[in-house]
Image: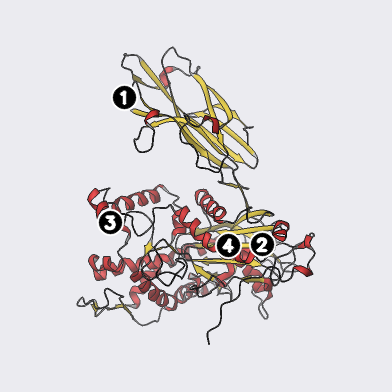
């Protein structure tokens, strides 16, 4: 008989036995590239802590296993969403509950973090390639709306987390509104090491827009960010300390935690400062990470498969392949999902001594025959080929771990234990290769029992002990939007004809008094770094005109769509600050210049307005090249 799914959490079960001033709810969210986990710190229903300290045991940390119909009720649910219509079976179109013909948006988390110019250029080139450089015939042939979404990565993540939030809300609704208004709540969110400010901001905006906010939790105290390896290390160290018969951790010894996930591999190292009465860890060096998770093995496999069966057949298998679509998101259709599910099974159990493996192509290639390659839809993945898929990622894992061994060595200590956690950390081949290499250095590789959920369990601990845990980033939202009025190149698509002017010198059509926003309402303000924004402003003047003026910073506070033109929105805006600049003492030959139609010289200067919000303090500066022209530190906030 099949085991019934667990019942939704009942957060009221222990309410009568607890003084109201001691109740507390801590929620942790681990949004991953391939899987997402969510849980509570609770005692049979509701989290709590005493005013003088945070009491809890590891056994009180429980993982949510109820994600609704069609989700198989695992401790984690796939980070996948589809905008395709469900079938008559009524699929949820996210996680594991997808209709057979759904186009699934996958690996969207990594799209939040295009940190380099090269990454952004890759994205643009991929998009242009898919659009056939905006060839109209190709766009028309697509048949209208594509089977994937036009939404940004941030919007897709918001939609996905909204689905996750719905199941949290089912549990929270068990509490009366009076209790929800009374119980202090904290939300801990995990992020990869080296997650860029842009990616953190997108994660925060998606999280709060999905419902993890003060509207749902009126007594919301803090939203905090913790890196995935640090959260995993905190939980793993405590679990190993409490495990019977194990003495892996000793005072003054160092260990490395390697979190191998679907998209990223993150590594952190610690020294055990104290075991009793409470475990205390001291971080060694800096956490490091790379995009080297298991999805890059999948990409190696897909690239190899395309070469094996040819572009035409691969297109039948994956009609929404990256270079053939109008967009830049990673997607998977029915056939590719079926094939990758089979490959995932092989990937997890693959070992160095494994014999060659056989796979079958799904419909519509189930009968494909290519002499010497594919026979009746069946093809072979040799041991050597599979090793090649893994080795690119494994080499990067080696390099990351070796870097921490060196950090510990420079600190005058040596590494005795490496703890391997995360979904990719369950790979037999990865463990074999790491163990074979580091055993020669007398370092023990260990895989904790709860390695797959170590990150999210550790995040709960960080939320409970937020006042004493190091390296946490507290998050608050920017309360208003701040912008300036500038002239932009005119576009019939984006601008009103009433804003159109023609520049006397360049003869270019411009849209005058357009509002550009430097800081956005709802953006993440981190406790460890200011929220910054900047905008270039070009001014012009002739030989006899004064070379000084003002820049007005406007503030917009509503939640509605922000205005784009100053002409029709002055009554909606608040003047937050008027800043002055003066270039009178700068010689004219220092400026760029052009001849006007009257043969008179017009000079140009490009000013750079920089804004920074730190805590409750908002400041701004105006620069010309390397010269500071104006600075204020008390802008309305």
Q: Residue 119 in the image: x percent, y percent?
A: 40, 51
**What is the CA distance from the residue labelled 3 to the residue labelled 1?**
40 Å
**What is the CA distance from the residue labelled 4 to the residue labelled 3?**
39 Å
3 or 1: tag closer to the N-terminus: 3
For the point 57% across and 56% down, the residue is 211
**What is the CA distance from the residue labelled 2 to the residue labelled 1?**
60 Å
SS category of the residue bearing label 2: strand
Question: What is the number of the mark on residue 26?
Answer: 2
Mark 3 or 1, closer to the camera: 3
* Mark 3 in CB contact with mark 1 (< 8 angstroms): no
Please rate how many residues cluster around mark 2, counting C-alpha atoms within 10 Å: few if below 14, some from 14 to 19, many from 20: many
Q: Which residue is mark 4?
A: 29
Q: Is residue 574 left or right of residue 83?
A: right
Q: Which residue is mark 1?
A: 507
Give the quarter of the image for residue 378: bottom left
* Mark 2 in CB contact with mark 3 (< 8 angstroms): no
Q: Is residue 525 visible?
A: yes
In the image, farthest residue toward the bottom: 1
**What is the CA distance from the residue labelled 1 to the residue labelled 4?**
54 Å
Please rate how many residues cluster around mark 3, counting C-alpha atoms within 10 Å: few if below 14, some from 14 to 19, many from 20: few
């Amino acid at each position: 008989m099949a085991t019934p799914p667990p019942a939704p959490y009942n957060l009221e079960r222990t309410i009568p036995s607890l003084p109201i001033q001691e109740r507390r709810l801590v929620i942790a969210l681990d949004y991953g590239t391939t899987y997402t986990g969510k849980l509570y710190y609770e005692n049979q229903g509701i989290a709590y802590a005493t005013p003088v300290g945070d009491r809890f045991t590891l056994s009180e940390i429980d993982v949510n296993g109820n994600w609704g119909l069609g989700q198989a009720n695992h401790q984690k649910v796939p980070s996948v969403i589809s905008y395709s219509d469900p079938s008559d079976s009524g699929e949820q179109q996210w996680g594991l509950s997808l209709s057979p013909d759904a186009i699934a948006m996958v690996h969207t988390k990594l799209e939040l973090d295009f940190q380099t110019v090269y990454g952004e250029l890759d994205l643009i080139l991929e998009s242009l390639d898919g659009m056939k450089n905006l060839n109209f015939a190709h766009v028309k042939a697509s048949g209208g709306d594509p089977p994937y979404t036009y939404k940004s990565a941030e919007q897709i993540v918001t939609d996905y987390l909204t689905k996750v939030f719905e199941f949290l809300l089912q549990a929270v609704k068990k509490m009366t509104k009076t209790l929800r208004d009374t119980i202090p709540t904290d939300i801990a969110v995990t992020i990869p090491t080296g997650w860029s400010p842009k990616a953190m901001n997108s994660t925060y905006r998606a999280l709060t827009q999905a419902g993890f906010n003060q509207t749902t939790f009126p007594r919301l105290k803090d939203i905090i960010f913790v890196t995935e390896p640090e959260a995993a290390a905190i939980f793993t160290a405590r679990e190993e300390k409490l495990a019977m018969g194990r003495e892996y951790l000793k005072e003054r010894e160092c260990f490395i935690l390697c979190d191998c996930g679907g998209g990223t591999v993150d590594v952190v190292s610690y020294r055990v400062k104290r075991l009793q009465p409470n475990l205390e860890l001291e971080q060694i060096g800096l956490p490091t990470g790379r995009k080297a998770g298991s999805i890059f093995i999948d990409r190696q496999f897909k690239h190899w498969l395309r070469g094996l069966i040819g572009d035409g057949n691969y297109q039948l298998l994956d009609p929404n392949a990256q270079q053939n679509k109008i967009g830049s998101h990673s997607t998977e259709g029915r056939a590719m999902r079926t094939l990758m599910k089979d490959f995932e099974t092989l990937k997890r159990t693959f070992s160095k001594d494994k014999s060659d493996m056989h796979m079958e192509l799904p419909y519509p290639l189930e009968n494909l025959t290519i002499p010497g390659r594919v026979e009746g839809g069946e093809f072979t993945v040799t041991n050597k080929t599979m090793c090649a898929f893994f080795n690119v990622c494994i080499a990067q894992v080696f390099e990351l771990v070796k870097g921490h061994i060196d950090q510990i060595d420079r600190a005058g200590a040596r590494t005795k234990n490496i703890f391997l956690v995360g979904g990719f950390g369950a790979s037999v081949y990865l463990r074999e290769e790491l163990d074979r290499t580091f055993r020669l250095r007398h370092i023990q590789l260990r895989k904790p029992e709860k390695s797959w959920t170590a990150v999210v369990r550790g995040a709960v601990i960080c939320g409970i002990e937020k006042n004493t845990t190091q390296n946490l980033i507290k998050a608050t939202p920017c309360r208003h939007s701040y912008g300036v009025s500038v002239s932009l190149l005119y576009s019939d698509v984006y601008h009103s004809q009433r804003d159109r002017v023609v520049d006397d010198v360049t003869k270019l059509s411009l849209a005058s008094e357009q509002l550009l926003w430097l800081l956005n309402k709802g953006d993440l303000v981190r406790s460890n770094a200011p929220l910054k924004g900047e905008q270039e402003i070009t001014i012009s003047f002739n030989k006899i005109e004064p070379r000084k003026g003002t820049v007005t910073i406007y503030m917009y506070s509503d939640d509605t769509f922000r205005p784009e033109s100053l002409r029709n929105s002055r009554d909606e805006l608040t003047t937050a600050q008027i800043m002055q600049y003066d270039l009178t003492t700068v010689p004219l030959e220092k400026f760029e210049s052009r001849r006007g139609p009257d043969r008179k010289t017009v000079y140009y200067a490009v000013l750079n307005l920089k804004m920074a919000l730190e805590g409750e303090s908002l400041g701004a500066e105006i620069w010309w090249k390397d010269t500071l022209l104006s600075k204020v530190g008390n802008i309305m906030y």
